[in-house]
Image: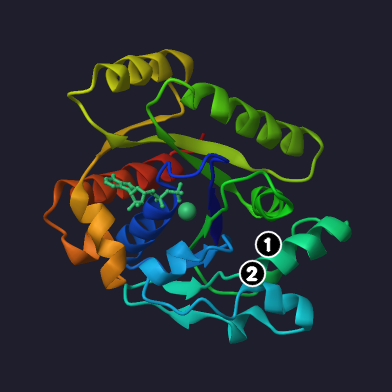
Amino acid sequence: MKIISISNQKGGVGKTTTAVNLAQAIAATNRKTLLVDLDPQGNASTASGAKKNNSLFETTLGKHVSELIQTSSNQYDVLAGGEDLVALEVALRNNPTKGHIAKSLKELDYDFVFIDTPPSLSSLTLDALISSDGTLIPLQCEYYSLEGITSLVNTINELTNSGLTNNKIFGIIRTMVDKRNNLTKDVSDDLEKHFPELLFNTLIPRNVKLAEAPSFGLAGTNYMPESFGAKAYLALAGELLRRLENVR
Ligand SMILES: Nc1ncnc2c1ncn2[C@@H]1O[C@H](COP(=O)(O)OP(=O)(O)O)[C@@H](O)[C@H]1O
Ligand SMILES: [Mg+2]
């Protein structure tokens, strides 16, 4: 089982869209996939056609995680997120047990677990980072994007150096790319200079089908598989699988 966090403390960069579409694209390759929604807003849950209840919070009430898992309208399963995750965040803050999420998921039988994290470096996100084998960082190519991910990259390095996790950054994903925009291109070129090994070659374009799909409770790759956005996420899934198969 590979646990992968999708993280960036900035909101609106495409974390949830990436989590949902990657989960579906990977599940479509017959790999057993779970999407964990760790954002109290529960966007990944509704985008997956799931209810915003039975979140990971209920593990603190003694429930086994297998009782909480729902099916989605896509091919992956969902551990939904909702407002009670705020209570889980408090519980994690007051409890020094690290890696609660990984411990909760340990006995499950999945090939891939994707965790959609909230837009902050809260204790929910920290526990997700500690619990993960790797992190994917969606990034919008804007002027301050690089500064934004520096603190995330530093946090992951600190957690790894203090022996709390083996989390590796699996890659940076450029989202909502508009090739006609010069600033996008400049930032994108800058990223290639700074993170040549981390950057995924696949660019996720700005595509309205990806924004429409959640209102149908479907991943874009399922809702409109022929759209540019869906094809990009399918390509990204292929690139991720190739990266993970090459020992790094
Ligand atoms: N590639 C894209 N093309 C068009 N709209 C997108 C794309 N990616 C995300 N969006 C839209 O942008 C908004 C923010 O994306 P979201 O995935 O929710 O970001 P985050 O989870 O980081 O806050 C949403 O309304 C989403 O539908
Ligand atoms: Mg989100």
Mark 2 residue's CB less than 8 Å from ligand 2: no
Task: Estimate the x, y position of residue 116 in percent, counting from the top left.
Answer: 51, 56
Q: Position of residue 108 (x, y in %)?
A: 59, 74
How would you rate the neighbour count of disc 1 (Cα within 10 Å): few for under 14, some for 14-19, many for 20 or more?
some
Snapshot colouring: rainbow
Other residues around mark 2 within 10 Å, as few (<14) / some (14–19) / many (≥20): some
Residue 192: image quadrant is: top left
Residue 224 as seen in the image, left or right of residue 41: left
Picture disc at residue 138 = none
Q: Quadrant of residue 39?
A: bottom right
* Whether residue 28 is visible: no
**Contact (Cβ within 8 Å) of mark 1 with mark 2:** yes
- Horizontal side of residue 240 vs 223, given as left or right: right
Residue identified by numbered label 1:
102
Percent from the top left, x then y, of residue 60?
A: 77, 76
Amino acid carrying mark 2 in the image: Leu
Q: Position of residue 125 (x, y in %)?
A: 65, 50
SS of the residue at dot 1? Answer: helix
Is the residue 20 above or below the residue 130 in the image? below
Q: Alpha-carbon distance for marks 1 and 2? A: 5 Å
Quarter-wise, where is residue 175 in the image? top left
- 146, above or below 203, in the image: above
Q: Which residue: 65% across, 48% down?
A: 129
> Which of the labelled discs sits on residue 105, or is there none?
2
Residue drawn at (41%, 40%) of the image? 243
* Residue closest to the eye, 204 or 181: 181
Q: Is residue 61 above or below residue 126?
A: below
Tag 2's secondary structure?
helix
Q: Is residue 4 something that shows in the picture?
A: yes
Q: Nearer the viewer, residue 60 or 243?
A: 60
